[in-house]
Amino acid sequence: MGAVQVSARRLDDRLVVAVVGELDIVGKRALCACVAKGLDAAVGQIVLDLSGVSFMDAQGLSALVMSRVRALSLDRGLVLAGVSAAVRRLLEITRMEASFELAPDIDEAESSSNGHDRSTPD
């Protein structure tokens, strides 16, 4: 298990959550807690900045899915921004990339309409 840093900042009605390091079981706890706190604070869209993720395993993928499901259950959007190669690879081999709205960077994610135009993952 590696080190992870999860930080959040509000931008208008959106919450930008930056993840740096390894998104594994330790990162899952930190990410899910941060997203839950943001959703409880009645923010609009959640933007996950994954550009700093160097490694992601099934626990990290689970954190992304859980965060998305929770956001959608509250009629909020979730966008994955700046998806690193490590994250993209796992999304592709699990065929989950189509389940998320992806943006090349934070600026593009912040300009998206609502972030929840994808159907629930199979």
Image: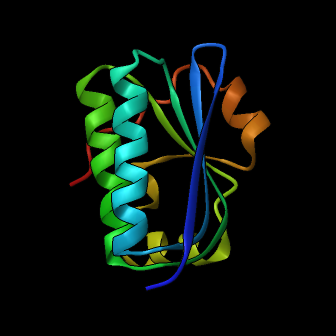
x%, y% of residue 54? 63, 77
Q: Is residue 95 visible?
A: no
Q: Position of residue 83 (x, y in %)?
A: 64, 60
The C terminus, quarter of image? bottom left
Instruction: Please state which of residues 59 and 27 is positioned toward the viewer in this rendering.
Output: 27
For image coordinates 35% across by 42% down, the residue present is 68
**Residue 76: which quarter of the image?**
top left
Note whether 82 is above or below 120 in the view shown. below
User: From what the image shows, is residue 56 above or below residue 30?
Assistant: below
Give me the residue at 33% from left, 73% from top.
25
Residue at image coords 33%, 76%:
58
Q: Is residue 104 left or right of residue 95?
A: right
**Left or right: where 111 falls relative to 48:** right
Does 72 sit left or right of 30 as displayed?
left
* Residue 91 seen in the figure: yes
Q: Residue furthest bottom?
A: 1
The spot of residue 35 in percent (x, y) is 41, 39
Residue 98 occupies quadrant = bottom left
Q: Residue at x 46, y 69 (%)?
A: 91
